Image: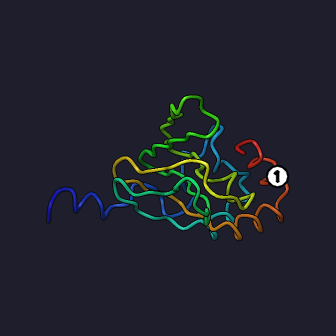
Amino acid sequence: MSRRGSRQSELVSPASCLRCRARRGRIFCNFARRALPSFDKIASLRRVPDGESLLVEGLPVSGVWVVCSGQVRVISFEGRMRGSPAIQFLGRGHAIGLAEALRSVPARANAVTLGDCELRFIPSPLLRRFLDRDIDACLWAAHFV
């Protein structure tokens, strides 16, 4: 087995958001402790390989991606003059596609993994239901839209 193959099989992130020490600070997944069990149930942990597209500008968004480890490049041309893109590099704790998932609108940017990443994926309907049921989580998520 190659060194790369063995690295891929190991999870860097804890299997549960409840045990994650990276939640501190103003990152998306830093919900109140009582909201975490519900969030943990709807967020599936996925290993995503280098170069995988998470969002494609203009296409429907099926949910939100939260970076647990690794980095994602987000490129947007929306509202930019003369075709120059806005480029962001997002890491641990950032939510990708949140505004689009909540509003049920197409992606406003392209998002691609840079290297192997571990991401939590939350389908849009489950996220909306979670936020409808927990006002504190809803207010926290509003900071990131």
Look at 51% across and 49% down and name the residue there.
Answer: 110
The amino acid on which the numbered mark 1 sits, given as a three-letter code, is Asp
Question: Residue 63 in the image: x percent, y percent?
Answer: 62, 63
Report which residue position mark 1 lands on: 136
Image quadrant containing the N terminus: bottom left
- Find residue 121 and report its image quarter: bottom right
Q: Which colour assignment does the render follow?
A: rainbow
User: Quick one: 66 or 77, which is closer to the camera?
Assistant: 77
Residue 28, above or below 59: above
Look at 70% across and 51% down and name the residue there.
Answer: 99
- In the rendered image, the residue lying farthest to the front is 82
User: Quick one: 137 or 105, which is closer to the camera?
Assistant: 105
Q: Secondary structure at mark 1?
A: helix
User: Quick one: 89 or 84, which is closer to the camera?
Assistant: 84
Look at 50% across and 41% down and name the residue there.
Answer: 75
Look at 35% across and 58% down and name the residue there.
Answer: 49
User: Quick one: 56 or 74, which is closer to the camera?
Assistant: 56
Looking at the image, residue 49 sits to the left or right of residue 85; the answer is left
Question: Residue 108 in the image: x percent, y percent?
Answer: 61, 49
- In the rendered image, the residue lying farthest to the left is 1
For mark 1, does the 10 Å Cα neighbourhood hold few (<14), some (14 to 19), or many (20 or more) residues?
some
Image quadrant containing the C terminus: top right
Q: How many marks?
A: 1
- Find residue 100 and report its image quarter: bottom right
Question: Residue 45 in the image: x percent, y percent?
Answer: 50, 64
